[in-house]
Amino acid sequence: MIPAEFDYAAPATLDEALRFLASTPDAKVLAGGMSLIPALKHRLLQPALLVDVGGIGELEGVTLRGGKARIGARTTHATLLGHPELAEAPVFADTAGVIGDVQVRNRGTFGGSLAHADPGADWPAVFLALDGEATLVGPKGRRSVRARDFFAGMMSTALAEDEILCELVLPLESKRAGAAYRKLRQPASGFAVAGAAAQVVLDRRGRIDAVAIGVTGVNAVPFRAASVEKRLVGQAPDPAALRTLCARVEEADPLGDLFASAEYRAHLAGVFVARAVAEALARAKL
Amino acid sequence: MPVKPVHVGQRIKRREDPRLIRGLATYTDDLKLHGMLHAAFVRSPYAAGRITGLDARRALARPGVAGVFSSDELRGRVGPAPCTAILPGMNHVPYPLLADGRVLYVGQPVAVVVARDRYLARDAALDVEVEIEDRLAVVDPEAALAAGAPKVYEELASNVCWHQPPEPNPRLDELFAKADGVVRLRLVNQRVAPVPMEGRAIVAHWEEGPQKLTLWSSTQTPHGAKQQVAMCLGLPELRIRVIAPEVGGGFGCKIPTYAEECLLPWLSRRLRKPVKWTETRTENLLATTHGRGHVETVEAAYTKDGRVTALRARTIADVGAFASMLGAAIPTFTHLLACGPYAIQAVSWEIVDVYTNTMATEAYRGAGRPEAAYVIERVMDEVARALRLDRVEVRRRNLLAKDVFPYTTPTGATYDSGDYEAAVSKALARFDWERSLAERDRRRAAGELVGVGVATFTEICGLGPSTGASALDRRGTWESAELRVEPTGAVCVMTGVSPHGQGQETAFAQLVADAFGIGLDEVTVLHGDTDVVTHGVGTFGSRGLVVGGTAVAMAIDKLVAKAKKIAAHGLGTTPDRIDFSGGFFTRPGAEVRLSWGDVALAAHLWNDPVPGEEPGLEAVARFEPPGTTFPFGVHLCRVSIDRDTGEIALERFLSVDDVGNVVNPLLADGQRLGGIVQGLGQAWCEQVRYDESGQLLTATLMDYAMPRAAMFPRIELDMTCTPSPLNPLGAKGIGELGTIGATPCFVSAVLDALAPCGVTHLDMPLTPERVWRALRDAGTSR
């Protein structure tokens, strides 16, 4: 790597990290570095200061309390892949297992993926589908941002320049509920060409009572497939019928690139929404 | 009485691996010399244009910058870049070490900055302001041939670099006239990037005292680099030492001697300091040679019983913006191997090498043969389709019989030996072809898209006789080996080949250890240093064992002959009465014997001189191959396709190959696994892509799709053995057959899977979107 020159700080506490961030106008938080380091290497970014949050213990870990998973932003994909607290929520293993490769999973982080907000990142779909909340800490204190308000634009989020994403809170539906993530991998980068996470809750008769679908890789910004969600509520879990109901994702406004045209992506959005919903339904037990 | 080999034929683990996997190997970039400076290149951001200004003042003002150089400093002093394949009638334009007045492709070096460290060098390179008046580029080789296309070189009449016109061939015309049918195909063999794990890296050190240049370079051909740098710089070869330290793969892109390898020595001499340059991955994708880049159109005449009788084809080969060292000659291999393993009677092959505003193409694992195999295998599949015959059956009807060898093809290749039917039978039995077809049909009936594929191929290895060498090469392609025996009997092998992953440190040690009855630990293999190995050509063209190994075998024979004389003297007899096996010299009927170590010691002590002999025990051998070798094989595979997404899953892959005798089956497996995966990479996902203005879109490994381990099932490997009569080892070469057979095999399977939908053609790479579109279009068109 031959980046431009930068300063480097490795604070031990969150407060210290915030002070470093505030100290330099052009500072960037370094977590796993799986997106930031390549950007530095290609000089797409030339920050004056890197604030490495790797030494801040409170940013790591998974706890399950009151039906909510609280995940430290610095927690790696590999940790989420096999975490005992998340054994009942296989959507985490679905997702972590298809991110990048082993090296990327060992270094890359949950919060880093959300904060970087690459259009092809996997976690944003899950974050949206589980209707999570992000805890942001800045000089003015803590605030919470709901998943649907978190993604502001292409590679841009609700995070202010002087804030650090420190925790993600994800409600885990347990009764008659299931969630899943499915995607098509971009063959070079491993990002999602199109990916969808779905969470369904069944009513007592086994019909879809509630459903949330997050879609990534398709648009510049990850989104909730609200139109499909609306169509699915009240439906019986009949695979063929569901496929038809999911086939068109009205919110899709796809980008075309080297690996997939806009047309193909729009098609894939429907395919993977259907697959995520089907698997979520299979996991939802009456 | 011959003793059973102890090491040869065994699956012995590579002696190279412990240092490689433990991080103990020394690559060029690991070198740190006192006072060493670092180079960074200013590269053209445009594919075509005129350089109107270059301002390096800001860069030079940075403390620690030793200099910024452009073609102004080089003109008339050094260059052009080496090119040895200057074909008769070729429109050859010498390629300057740094762009001179014009730029020809994105990534071309325009200026070089030399500084205290590589970070500073990169920063300063970004400070160099180059003004370029850009103009329309031409990127597509077919478009480059159109009237009115932008010209890469204004001074040439067109973008044609070299043209081999079709030769009049009455026999061919007659076969086409008599044909029961003609298959016509247009096939794109897309441009791919070699992507060795280690990119290019160079350290040049000119020492003013001894007036000597030492050049460390990540190259496949250190001796070639020595002579090319000597010619480029106008230095005597004996003032140059080239060292290829650990080299992390090449695949052909490290055969040529690059402009940078000539420029760094010049810089070192000018600045009186060692200078290092290590390319970045993006530089590797931009400015290290690419491979393939062919468009082939072919017509094949066939009889109603499925025999292909004649081929009429045209290759349009994208040589890129300049002719790399061998680049223009690569398509001649496509022509030479046009017939594959089949009894085709006449061939006409036109070649048009075309300049485009892109990086140059070069040899890439297979170098022309994969293109040939792809054409003839697709032809066989099409004939099978036209005649509603099994694809294997069509091949069987066309394969050469085992009693025809040596066999000279209509294109002039002389196949040394072969038994193609034996390999086919073995492969079919192991794959259970008939059952695979039945299983395919059963799954199809259940709604799945499933296909099986086949490729039978032969290729050319063991390059090769020196008949094609020109004065620009200075030396032919014969190979050398030197064996030096220590007083303990340990043997040092100095080989002219330059392995960079192939494992010849292990294979050659096996040959030597068995010959002298010593342990592998008593053999060391040295290579890749022109001051240690006096003559060499290098490692490419699957020649390591075939040519380099044969030279070792010849040197072994010479050593044994001398050792027998010494032993005979010691045992009080004549050399012809000495038997040497298992490490002992014996005299018939006598109990007393001498070990290899006894003789080695006697040769060095010389306290009992052998009359008429010199002391010491060493031998030098040179092997000029009498011909090239033609390994062959059969690849079979099965794929399934996801109807919704177009994704392909490779379910099974079997490779049954015949490479003659094998020294180390483990190494042979490794060569085949790597080659097969690389060949499948081309078929499945790899493609170098430029946009219309000549910008490289696949300039990182986030964009250039390399195959990954998780894409592959456990690849099944098997062999038949038809030794080559052309060398004492009976070896045929193995390095490239994976990329020759696997690519058409995969495409054959995918097209078979899509056949029920009416899809008959797809160009590589077979990406999900391409497959999905084909399915969709087939669906709507019916």
Image (cartoon, rainbow, N blue to C red):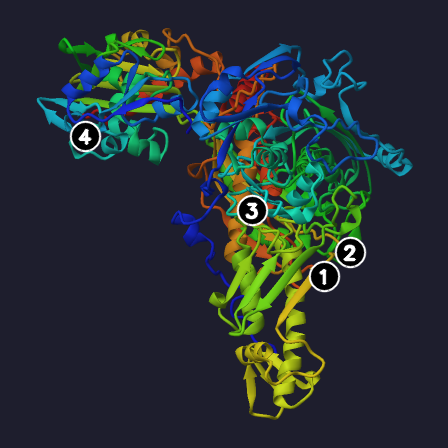
Amino acid identity at mark 1: Pro
Residue at the spot of label 1: B725
Q: Quadrant of residue B118?
A: top left
* Disc on the earlier residue, 1 or 3: 3
Real-space CA distance between mark 4 and mark 1, rounded to the nearest whole angstrom? 64 Å
Disc marking residue A86: 4
Q: Chain of mark 2?
A: B
Cα separation, mark 2 vs mark 1, equals 9 Å
Q: Which three-letter amino acid code belongs to the residue tagged 2?
A: Pro
**Letter of the chain that mark 1 sits on in the rendering:** B
Badge 3: residue crowd in 10 Å (few <14, some 14–19, many ≥20): many
Residue that extends furthest to the front in the rendered view of this protein: B209
The image shows a total of numbered marks equal to 4
Circle 4/circle 2 CB separation < 8 Å:
no
Dots 3 and 2 on the same chain: yes
Q: What chain does mark 3 sit on? A: B
The lab-note entry on whether marks 4 and 3 share a chain reads no
Percent position of residue B376, x then y: 70, 37
Secondary structure beneath disc 2?
loop
Marks 3, 2: nearer the viewer: 3
Name the amino acid type tagged 3. Answer: Ala
Residue at 12% from the left image edge and 26% from the top image edge: A64
Q: Secondary structure at mark 1?
A: loop
Q: Is residue B640 left or right of residue B366?
A: left
Whether residue A173 is visible to the viewer of this picture, yes or no, is no
What distance separates the C-alpha of mark 4 from that of mark 3?
51 Å
Label 2 sits on residue: B406
Q: CA distance from mark 1 to mark 3?
A: 32 Å
- Please state the horizontal and vertical placement of residue B629, each as a whole percent of the image: 70, 53
CA gap between label 3 and label 2 equals 37 Å
Q: Are marks 2 and 1 on the same chain?
A: yes
How packed mark 2 is, by other alpha carbons closer than 10 Å (few <14, some 14-19, many 20 or more), is some
